[in-house]
Image: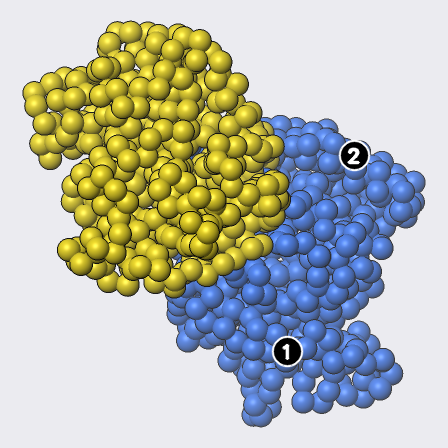
Chain colours: A yellow, B blue
Amino acid sequence: MKRNVLIIGAGGVGQVVAHKCAQHNDVLGDIHLASRSIEKCEAILRSVREKRSLKTGGRLVGHALDALDVERTAQLIRDTGAEIVINVGSAFLNMSVLSACIATGAAYIDTAIHEDPLKICETPPWYGNYEWKRHADCAGAGITAILGAGFDPGVVNAYAALARDEYFDKIDSIDIVDVNAGDHGRYFATNFDPEINFREFTGQVWSWQKGEWTANKMFEVSKKWDLPVVGNRTTYLTGHDEIHSLSKNLDVPNVRFWMGFGERYINVFTVLRNLGLLSEQPVKTAEGLEVVPLKVVKAVLPDPSSLAPDYAGKTCIGDVVKGVKDGQKREIFIYNVADHEEAYAEVGSQAISYTAGVPAAAAAILVAKGDWDARKMVNVEELAPRPFLHLLDQMGLPTRIRDAEGDRPLSFEGKPATAATRAAEPALAG
Amino acid sequence: MKRNVLIIGAGGVGQVVAHKCAQHNDVLGDIHLASRSIEKCEAILRSVREKRSLKTGGRLVGHALDALDVERTAQLIRDTGAEIVINVGSAFLNMSVLSACIATGAAYIDTAIHEDPLKICETPPWYGNYEWKRHADCAGAGITAILGAGFDPGVVNAYAALARDEYFDKIDSIDIVDVNAGDHGRYFATNFDPEINFREFTGQVWSWQKGEWTANKMFEVSKKWDLPVVGNRTTYLTGHDEIHSLSKNLDVPNVRFWMGFGERYINVFTVLRNLGLLSEQPVKTAEGLEVVPLKVVKAVLPDPSSLAPDYAGKTCIGDVVKGVKDGQKREIFIYNVADHEEAYAEVGSQAISYTAGVPAAAAAILVAKGDWDARKMVNVEELAPRPFLHLLDQMGLPTRIRDAEGDRPLSFEGKPATAATRAAEPALAG
């Protein structure tokens, strides 16, 4: 049993994690929230108190922290007695926070891969460039480090593991599809940190095809999907974290990630990229000021957490898995549909933050309870998927299955969902 | 007679002015070029020497100067013995350079209106906010200050004066049309300082209609013109310097400015403006750096002078004037066509810089010779247009006339051009 949680990062995802940890503080103990900006921590903690998210009486404390500083981060872990650290800060922080966890013995959970501010889209597999280099350190010290425990990466990795365990003898392809059919009413905004968002798309698109890394350009390859609830959507082959672990941990020759983009997004992205405004490399103004263009773009765009009050519509994210079971070809879509307005009503965040933050809190609960306390570094597909998906079902992110037999919730009656369970559940509008 | 020229500004226009002054250094005397960057001065002076632009032996010297510093600018005017200052630096410098001229007695010439870095598109007439406030100072001290002596403003103001003097008894409307049909081969670039370029379009569009200032939004009002050489072009009602003096100095109820824009320009502009990246007001990055977005956009865009080697095609800029002569309704288009490649071959700059820089050098020659040594502050339409247009005819910017009688060069035989002179000139392809 591990107790007391330190959440690092006070953006939209941090807000969700704080609320969800508070709702389970009988298991998790004290809840600490740290960010460069103490004001952002305080705002989130106010929201947790206002919405009465704390399940039982307990500590709820904000801290100012530069999490690039390993020493100070380790000291805060010691001072707070946190045995679990949930890192939902910038992707630039992973390695320093992980180092602090290894130094202190705390369990580490994050939701996105580490990035070097000055490098975009490095050689695959991306995890091999940073996190996996500390694999032996974690195993040696018995440190639990769960990498990529958001929705994608995270829940979609668990979906892949579930498909492998219960639905297929042999998987030929996993296509992860991420569509946000929500509308925030702004001219343009990203749904999470614009800097990290754009960095996903400015380099090469890496996919795992026929057992090899394949490079494409962004918006070069598109594919339409007919999805539950959100309907027909055009998506684009996109580089994404989970491909870089699934390709190693699962014996699957094709792992691809498809993200839905509207015309507005593509136009804005194309203009900004072509002008050089998405560059992570500094430029010098005529006045001699050195500045990274992408950081200025981030500064002028809406704060993603500010979108939440006006956000309406749903997201649909899941895994289209194809392969063979009992000698028969099979195709299955394991997915979740989340609702922006419901997420906002519950925790004050939009659904993109919600789908990323709830799984991280669920992972922390599983670590606290021992189910997922792996005492080594793992990606989510290396852990048992059912406890995670069961907990998410109760925490607001239910899993559904669509295949030849129909569309139904994933059953937790101790065996895979079948058509027999379907009639008992109301169908989601298609 | 005034002699010795100090050119302030070493961009694309400064390069043209330096070459053109050098070609007339028998009249103008020493040529000094000052800029914040001495390297940019040296590069231009090298180009002047390489192209053997100096007409006679004479001084050609570069200087590092912060022209916002009135004292240092005045000192440089005194040190160089310059009696004429041609200010083709940033539009933010006008008032400090003008002050230095008033302090030293030097004549002042510029090509664009003064701007305050933190203000966009102020109350019309724009000249009333800055330059005209020094009108009495110039008159009192006998200082010649010629405002807006580029092409537009500048030559188009002289076209308006010519129309008034020679073609109309009463003018109803002056529509200034500026179309650049050139192609620089880049995804996107502005033809002069991006900061000044964008600032023209981010505020209200002021036009003078029915004797009143009228406000529109950028790209709200469009108009197609069938123009010589460049053909059918869509233009947009745009705020521009010359409207702000012509509306005061000419008794004309309608003065409008129409600029041609391609779809790419409009899309890029729209995206950047809507995101807030064209803002002249500083923002703060997540790291706490204060920066003006527009200055970062400028920093990533191509240096306009770098476009020149690959620039092909022509510009067409002129005045469509409508009114009455001898009781008859009349319409006339007074215009110039310039060629990007010819400009580059002659002075190493593209045609947008060429059309702005040649008139400023011509104005300096007229001041030196006494024709335009007004000893007060004037806009170009307050000066005799024929000496200016005649000199421009010889310096590379010939004036043409298109009306009911046909399309022909403006004649300098001592009377207005008529159809009789037309046959002697080769027609430009329409």
The answer to which image quadrant residue B425 occupies is bottom right
Quadrant that contains the C terminus of chain B: bottom right
Image quarter for residue B118? top left
For label 2, the crowd category at 10 Å Cα-Cα, with few meaning under 14, some 14 to 19 and many 20 or more, is some
Q: Specify the farthest residue to the front.
A: A326
**Residue lying at the far bottom of the rendered structure:** B328
Residue B93 in view in this figure: no
**Badge 1 sits on which subunit?**
B
Task: Report the residue marked by disc 2.
Answer: B42
Q: Secondary structure at mark 1?
A: strand
Residue at horizontal 60%, vertical 32%?
A: A123
**B41 relative position to A273: left or right:** right
- Could you say which is closer to the camera, residue B414 or residue B86? B86
Q: Is label 2 in a helix, a strand or a loop?
A: helix
A15 versus A98 height, above or below: below
Q: Identify the mark nearer the N-term, 1 or 2.
A: 2
Q: Choose top left, top right, bottom left or bottom right for residue B41.
A: top right
Residue plotted at (72% across, 51% down)? B307
Which residue position holds label 1?
B232
Amino acid, disc 2 = Glu
**Is there any visible trace of residue A222 in the rendered image?**
yes
Observer-side mark, 1 or 2, equals: 1
Mark number for residue B382?
Answer: none
